[in-house]
Amino acid sequence: MNYGERLASWYLRLNGFIPMPDFVLHRLVPQDTPGNSAAHHADVDLLAVRFPFVHEEIGGQTEDWDREHLQELLSEDRPSAVIVEVKTGDQKPWPDEGRLERSVQRIGLVPRHQANQVAAALMPIRRDRRAAPPQAVHDQRAVIGTLLVCPNAQARTLRRRYTHVISLEHCDQFIQARMAKYRNYKHPGRLFFPDELIQYLAWKAGLEVDT
């Protein structure tokens, strides 16, 4: 995982999601098959699921969730899932319907035969810059959306391509604010976190003293 993917993963984890990084999409058809994304090996940056009654004593309270940016993905009556693309530069990604379908199948919140319908509903409208962004799919069993995490300069121009677009800068600020809010717990427990980035942010928050 690169630093952008780690920021996105921790942002989602601190909002009650269970993230799975680097979901591998194996080649399914001959490599020379034109126009078929399954003709190449690829991966999805993150898949993440969230259950409606998630709770933690430290950092898992109702007021801790980023409701302004995640909206209906923080469902209170059914599981939710998000398929995540992370970009750290000026790339302009476009969701791939085949990869979305395979991601929905892997998540497993709707039957396999409905995965293609969910994927189609999550796709943006091509060649219409005035089109509204796709909406998260609300099934009676689950809510499924897509998320692009990218630099703020690109986020403004790519909002119609995913159900949710959040900047890397916002992810960073959210994580730092969470570390600061619970610094009395996060700083002493920093080495129990599984990667160096979050350990550093917990350590940094612990150095700050309220005035």
Image (tube, rainbow, N blue to C red):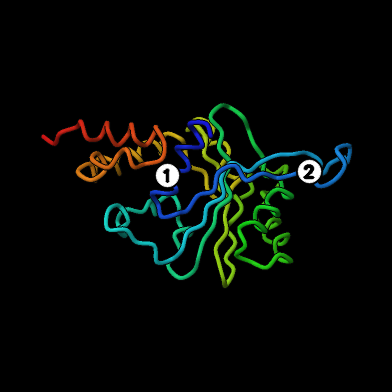
The residue tagged with tag 2: helix, strand or loop? Answer: loop
Q: Residue at horizontal 78%, vertical 39%? A: 40
Q: Residue at horizontal 60%, vertical 61%? A: 137
Q: Residue at horizontal 81%, vertical 47%? A: 28
**Residue under pointer 1:** 11
Could you give the CA–CA distance between mark 1 and mark 2, rounded to whole angstroms? 30 Å
The residue tagged with tag 1: helix, strand or loop? Answer: helix
Kind of residue at badge 2: Arg
Crowd band around label 1 with a 10 angstrom C-alpha radius: few (<14), some (14–19), many (20+): many
Q: Residue furthest bottom?
A: 140
Q: Position of residue 156 (x, y in %)?
A: 52, 37
Q: Position of residue 193 (x, y in %)?
A: 36, 41
Name the image quarter holding the C terminus: top left
Q: Residue at horizontal 33%, vertical 42%? A: 192
Q: Is residue 119 above or below residue 162?
A: below
Give the number of the mark in front: 1 or 2: 2
Q: Position of residue 69 (x, y in %)?
A: 43, 49
Q: Earlier in the sequence, mark 1 or mark 2?
A: 1
Nearer the observer, 113 or 18: 18
Q: Residue furthest left?
A: 211
* Residues tagged 1 and 2 counted as in contact (Cβ below 8 A): no
Label ID, residue 27:
2
Kind of residue at badge 1: Tyr
Crowd band around label 2 with a 10 angstrom C-alpha radius: few (<14), some (14–19), many (20+): some
Nearer the observer, 86 or 39: 39
Q: Is residue 57 above or below residue 86?
A: below
Q: Is residue 209 above or below residue 148?
A: above
Q: With 199 as the anchor, is 95 left or right in this view?
A: right
Quadrant assignment, res 113: bottom right
Q: Residue furthest top?
A: 89
Q: With 30 as the anchor, is 19 left or right in this view?
A: left
